[in-house]
Image (cartoon, grey):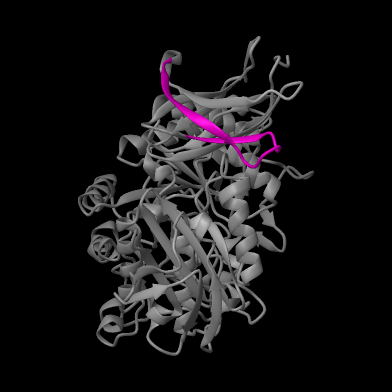
Amino acid sequence: MISRIAISDISPAVFFGGEFLPVKAIPGERITISATIVIEGHEKLTAEVVLHGVGGKVISRSQMLENWPGSNRFEGEVLVPSEGDYFFIVEADSTSQYRTVMGSSEKYPIYADRERALVGSWYEFFPRSEGAVKNPDGTITSGTFKTALKRIPAIADMGFNVLYLPPIHPIGVSHRKGANNSLTTAPGDPGVPWAIGETAGGHDAINPELGTMEDFKNFVAVAKKNGIEVALDLALQTSPDHPWVQSHPEWFNKRADGTIAYAENPPKKYQDIYPLNFDDNYEGLRNEVLRIIRLWVSKGVEIFRVDNPHTKPVHFWQDLLAIVRAESPHVIFLAEAFTAPAMMHALGKAGFHQSYTYFTWRSSKAELTDYGRELSTHTSAFFRPNLWVNTPDINPFHLHGGNPAIFALRAVLAATLSPSWGMYAGYELYEHLPLKPDGEEYLDSEKYQFKIRDWDGAAKKGLTLAPFIKKLNEIRAANSALLRLRNLVFHYTESEAIIAYSKRDGDNLILVVVNLDPNYAQGTIIHWDTKALGIDGTSFIVKDLLDGSTFNWSPDTYVSLDPTRPVGKVAHICQVKI
């Protein structure tokens, strides 16, 4: 029903499944609220956005201003104070010499998760490779949780606060894959961790080669002491040897001949993996997944990276995640969904806290600008991005040359464009060789075999990006502007090789300039939008947080960056002295 003062086109609002769902937020986050407000005649309108908490208690009232005269588009801001449920209402009034008219909108929900739902620096490694030993006969003895513990301090020193582990469960034997995705195995091949389940157990068990449940709990405790949360993979699929295959055959799809169909994601085939069927015993399967999640939460895990959620029903995730949120609101789910944008967005609306994105493939200035605006503005109410520079599955084409500068500049982009970013082990060592020139699989992929890395040797020889990664994460930790999503503003540059953008949170204003050309020096004039920056004057002082340099910049600033010099010269990350 339209009120006397018509209030419409309210943003942000998340409409899904026939209802308004909560806008995503975290404590301390500022959210811009906008609405179109009209009344008949020529009376002057005023408006406020009112934030309400539990029980409808008014938390704050903020004035809304018309974007420009005659537009009837008003904007205001709410500051979310703490975790939990909120809603906002837009209120408007019009006063003349003979009447006062008031109107208000419907309630629009907001839910504030804990900060890690938006903000994090993620690192991925395979525990079986950390501490693995090559034997005289050429076989390799697996690393364990105990040996992998030794890598945790180095990860913490680089500034990462989430350590994501691929599946840690028993690995199937049937159709086990060999090196480089071979259909035949050699003695000692460890198999793909995502082929879950064997006689030692399934999703609720530890791979015996990695240790025991007590070893895992100790691993989580040591990580926590180092300021790191452990994220586990939740991969809802099985090997042909998983206990479910015998105990719950109705959870699997059958071919006409009665055999179970293995997984496919064209052109890839996964002969060692069975997908699940959610149609024949939905409640039983959902309850089993809930049991598994509850088990790992009881062991200290509060973050799950969900493998291929887009291959499962969206309503299943909405159902499952709502139950988990009610029981354990601090548990966070990251969607590994490299699929159609509509599905990725649907998963965000269904309850996923974060998602992988297309950033890994966006490399040009136009691509990065368009995608950055989409993530920070158009979808930020329901879709939180986690920008990964690489994954075990994705060795991007732009890394194949192995130029250290491209590794550095991509890390800068990921770490500064989004509050959450991620890196798979080996990136800091410039690992780049592809299995095929026209493909994005790594040569000797760690998915199929052990990978023994000489971390200490690389550090002694200076053949590591780790110090630069550490600096990036230190800059992020010290600047709240970089830990927000909705504040990203791009600024015009006269070169397609240089991208410039800013982020501001209160008095913390950060300017980022990146040379997207890893091979040659590039220079250009940057036209800073001082109104968008919220600064006055013809010049302003900035400090480059990468190398400590100080510059006197103006609204039209010439900048040159040379990637052939030390890696710090691929970019400026500058704090403006306000």
Residue farthest front in this picture: 97
Answer above or below: position of 361 versus 342: below
Kindly identify the residue that appears in the image at 31 percent across and 82 percent down: 458
Answer above or below: position of 3 versus 135: above
Near-viewer residue (150 or 328): 328
Near-viewer residue (370 or 216): 370
Near-viewer residue (176 or 158): 158
Name the image quarter holding residue 20: top right
Name the image quarter holding residue 71: top right
Q: Quadrant of the C terminus?
A: bottom left
Query: In the image, residue 411 lies at what x, y percent?
Result: 45, 69
Q: Where does the magenta region start and end?
A: 57-77
Report the magenta stretch's main SS. Answer: strand
Asked if the stretch drawn in magenta spans residue 531, the answer is no
Kindly identify the residue that appears in the image at 48 percent across and 80 percent down: 559
Left or right relative to 407: residue 47: right
Q: In this orientation, does residue 209 appear? A: no
Name the image quarter holding residue 452: bottom left
Q: Quadrant of the N terminus?
A: top right
Query: In the image, residue 309 lies at what x, y percent?
Result: 59, 45
Left or right relative to 3: residue 511: left
Residue farthest right in this picture: 256
Answer above or below: position of 558 versus 39: below
Q: In this orientation, does residue 37 appear? A: yes
Kindly identify the residue that appears in the image at 57 percent across and 35 percent down: 65
Query: In the image, residue 22 lies at what x, y percent?
Result: 54, 29
Kindly identify the residue that appears in the image at 35 percent across and 51 percent down: 507
Left or right relative to 450: residue 363: right
Query: In the image, residue 39 lies at what x, y percent?
Result: 72, 22
Near-viewer residue (325 or 293): 325
How many numbered badges does the structure rendering display?
Answer: 0
Asked if the stretch drawn in magenta spans residue 75, the answer is yes
